[in-house]
Image (tube, rainbow, N blue to C red):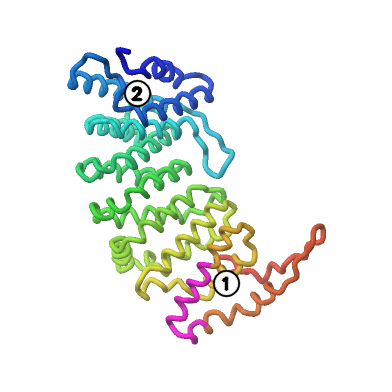
Amino acid sequence: GLEWPYERLCEFLTVDLFDLNWQVRHGAAMGLREIVRVHGAGAGREHGKTRAQNDLLNERWLNDLVCRLCCVFMLDRFGDYVSDNVVAPIRETAGQALGALLQHAPPNLVRATYRILYRLVMQEDPKSATRSWQACHGGMIGMRYLVAVRNDLLLQDDAFMDGVLEVVMKGLGDWDDDVRAVSAATLIPVAKEIVGLRPAALRSLITIVWDCLSNLSDDLSASTGSVMDLLAKLCSFPEVLDAMKQNAAKDQEHSFTELVPRLYPFLRHTITSVRSAVLRALLTFLNIAGKDTKGWVTGKTLRLIYQNLLVERNDGVLKLSLQVWNALLDVLILYGHERFAAEFVPHVDALLTLTVHPIGVPRHPLPMDPTLFIRPSGQT
């Protein structure tokens, strides 16, 4: 009864963090996460010591565990490719444990942890010959939980804020799809703070995000959904829209009329989360005030969304498609009925033919005429 009751248990778990079996590592990280979440403030304390001595013991204990968790980010290579994004259960759970721990940590320990994670993501050490995407992914996961839990320090420390922004922009430009996904997810919780405190960086950030969406070489790129969610979040702030308008004034290729059609190929993406993300992004753009932001709403947009309503099989995506369709109609009606007629009439015959096409029965499908569908490029 003279020491912290979980001392011996945590000693076992911290050793198991480095076990050869991934299940053991995963279980150890989960156990530490739950203990630290509730009892982290009492970790390492001893009966009979003064408050100052116990505070120092607690900080040392937390410091030791942070070091071990950062080593897990560096060393772990296990990934499960069963879903759209890679699932790295050990790195993810270690990140959650780090987030739980940093709630109890003093600011100097949080900043020291940030510096380690920064080096993991950037990997600019001249002694390192090869770059490990798994270590970069682990560092990005740690950064994501650090930013989500201790965003109070972001508001106090300019260097901290600049470093996080630099790391995220580096991650968004990374060649690895999973690093891009975690980078986008890192920025979403602190988007408001970034927009308010770093307006000068918005134009380059928006350019990087749009460039992420212009690379269509990989049909299974799962980071697209996370990047699109980040884009929709950023575009909900007036400051970001002003930055995009300034970019468009300098270069017409950065206007909404040119940028939004880049999202159309993702409407029929093979991954459900990406299809729903693009529809959420389109809804965000439709809700933006100002007619100069609606130049992309054309007959082709109407036809692509209507095609979505005809062929989408996922119920959630189907409901989102209907919301986008109704929002498109509301926008066009603002310009008058003649504008809607001019945009939609050229497509009515093909869409009506597809709509009244009979539904087949099992083993006797009745295929639709594919020449009546158009691609995002406008070709049938």
- SS class, disc 2: helix
Q: Position of residue 373 (x, y in %)?
A: 64, 69
The residue at which mark 1 appears reads as: 303
Nearer the observer, 48 or 12: 48
What residue is at 48 percent from the left and 52 percent from the top? 225
Q: Position of residue 218 (x, y in %)?
A: 54, 49
**Residue located farthest toward the front when viewing the structure as drawn:** 1
| Chain part drawn in magenta | 323-340
Nearer the observer, 84 or 95: 95
Numbered label attached to residue 317: none
Q: Nearer the viewer, mark 2 or mark 1?
A: 2
Up/down of 262 relative to 342, above or below: above
**Magenta stretch prevailing secondary structure:** helix
Q: Residues within 10 Å of mark 2 (few under 14, many from 20)?
A: some
The residue at which mark 2 appears reads as: 65
Q: Position of residue 100 (x, y in %)?
A: 36, 33
What residue is at 33 percent from the left and 67 percent from the top? 248
